[in-house]
Image (cartoon, rainbow, N blue to C red):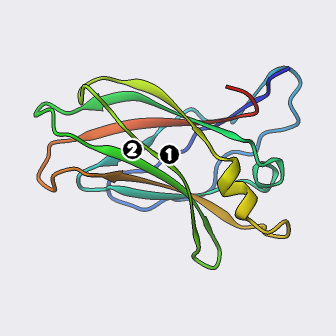
Amino acid sequence: MALTLVVVLATSACSAWEGSPARSGEPRSEVATSETESAIVLSADLPRVAVPLDRKLIAWRPPILEAEIVALENPNLAPFSIALALRTSGGEMLRIGRFAVYPADREGRFQLHASGAWAQLPETVSKVELVVELKDHEESADLSLDLMIRWQTEP
């Protein structure tokens, strides 16, 4: 049985992350979902977002991260990629991976293996952030996207 935890995170273009993701209870079926349904918003003006992860998610350490671009505005077809990492409270960055979108105006779903990053975390760590960063884009690009993050045990 595959388990999926949808960690749906919200930001605004003019402020950093406020609050924390909604806590999900124990899965009663195959899918456990957070209470809110908003996406991470990235743009040329806000290329990096750091989101605190729930303690239950940190304890679970799911091996698969799925990133889905649910909305994308890129009228100039500027190339870009998205990098994801875990950041410890000490500031250490543990790379999950990176993906590029091609064609540069298409929404899509991407899966990354996160088990390597989780394996580098000490068992006792209790504060971890997911860092999502827009890379390889032109500073002046008219680019924005909404990204949903899901953690899974199986692809």
Q: Earlier in the sequence, mark 1 or mark 2?
A: 1
Locate the N terminus and report the quarter of the image it occupies. Answer: top right
Q: Position of residue 128 (x, y in %)?
A: 67, 63
In the displayed structure image, the side of residue 70 where residue 140 appears, left or right: left
Residue drawn at 63 percent across, 55 percent down: 20
For residue 76, what is the image quadrant?
A: top left
Q: CA gap, disc 1 to disc 2?
A: 7 Å
Q: How many marks?
A: 2
Q: Position of residue 2 (x, y in %)?
A: 80, 23
Residue located beneath label 2 in the image: 41
Q: Position of residue 144 (x, y in %)?
A: 27, 40
Q: Which mark is residue 105?
A: none
Q: Are marks 1 and 2 in contact (CB under 8 Å)?
A: yes
SS at badge 1: loop
In the displayed structure image, the side of residue 148 where residue 153 appears, left or right: right
> In the displayed structure, would residue 22 be above or below residue 18?
above
Residue drawn at 79 percent across, 69 percent down: 122
Q: Which mark is residue 10?
A: 1
In the displayed structure image, the side of residue 142 where residue 26 appears, left or right: right
Q: Amino acid at mark 1?
A: Ala
Q: Crowdedness of circle 1 by 10 Å Cα count: few (<14), some, many (20+)?
A: many
SS at badge 2: strand
- Residue toward you, 149 or 114: 114
In the displayed structure image, the side of residue 22 where residue 61 appears, left or right: right
